[in-house]
Amino acid sequence: MSKLEQSYKDGKRSPPIKVLSGQLRAAGIRGAADSAEGYVIRAGRGRTLRVSLVWMQGTVLEVQLDGTTVMLMDETGTFAVQGVNNIPKGKPCLLPGKYVMVMGVIQAVSPEPVIRAVKMADLSDFAALHRQMWKLEVEELQQVLA
């Protein structure tokens, strides 16, 4: 378990930041990936945010045979989520076509974002609404924080 994951579980960590995969792909590193510094993303209007713990949403494209990693896609691209086999109640989300939310620690941003899952939930029941609102939720939170 990384220092970030442990600090999140210990309640000493700020909440996850809502991001899009395209923002992570374009991020710059600001210290060790599992340090409190994390990565710097563009939050719009020339502002930046430092992120290490993220909240992302997307559609499950593929589940690896061993069940530990899934490939998701949001409206800006694809990203991988590792450690899903360790998430309580995460297994029902692991079907292609499901729309899910993932909270986790950034493991890599290039060439494709990789997140180590801390929490995962199935949002498929209202997927159309969640998809439609997601980019607006991300933009609003980032404006408030930046």
Image (cartoon, helix red, strand yellow):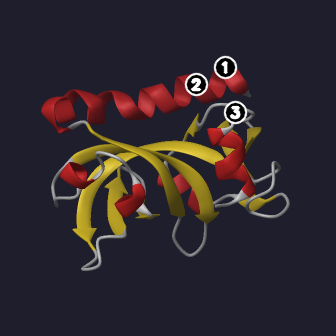
For the residues bearing labels 2 and 1, Cβ distance under 8 angstroms: yes
Vertical arrangement, residue 99 with respect to residue 27, above or below: above
| Residue 26's disc number | none
**In x, y percent, where is residue 141?**
58, 25
**Can residue 41 be seen by looking at this rendering?**
no
For the residues bearing labels 1 and 3, Cβ distance under 8 angstroms: no
Q: Which residue is mark 1?
A: 144
Q: Which residue is mark 3?
A: 45
Estimate the spatial distance between the alpha carbons at disc 2 and disc 1, rounded to whole Å: 5 Å
Q: Is residue 119 left or right of residue 46?
A: left
* Mark in the foreground, 1 or 3: 1
Question: Which type of secondary structure does the marked residue at label 3 adopt?
Answer: loop
* Mark in the foreground, 3 or 2: 2
Estimate the spatial distance between the alpha carbons at disc 3 and disc 2, rounded to whole Å: 14 Å
- How many numbered marks have been drawn onto this rendered protein structure? 3
Vertical arrangement, residue 144 with respect to residue 59, above or below: above
Residue drawn 60% across the image and 53% down it: 105
**In x, y percent, where is residue 58?**
33, 49
Q: Quadrant of the C terminus?
A: top right
Vertical arrangement, residue 117 with respect to residue 50, above or below: below
Question: Which type of secondary structure does the marked residue at label 2 adopt?
Answer: helix
Q: Which residue is mark 2?
A: 141
**In x, y percent, where is residue 78?**
39, 63
What is the crowding at mark 2: few (fewer than 14 residues within 10 Å), some, or many (at least 20)?
A: some
125 or 41, nearer to the observer: 125
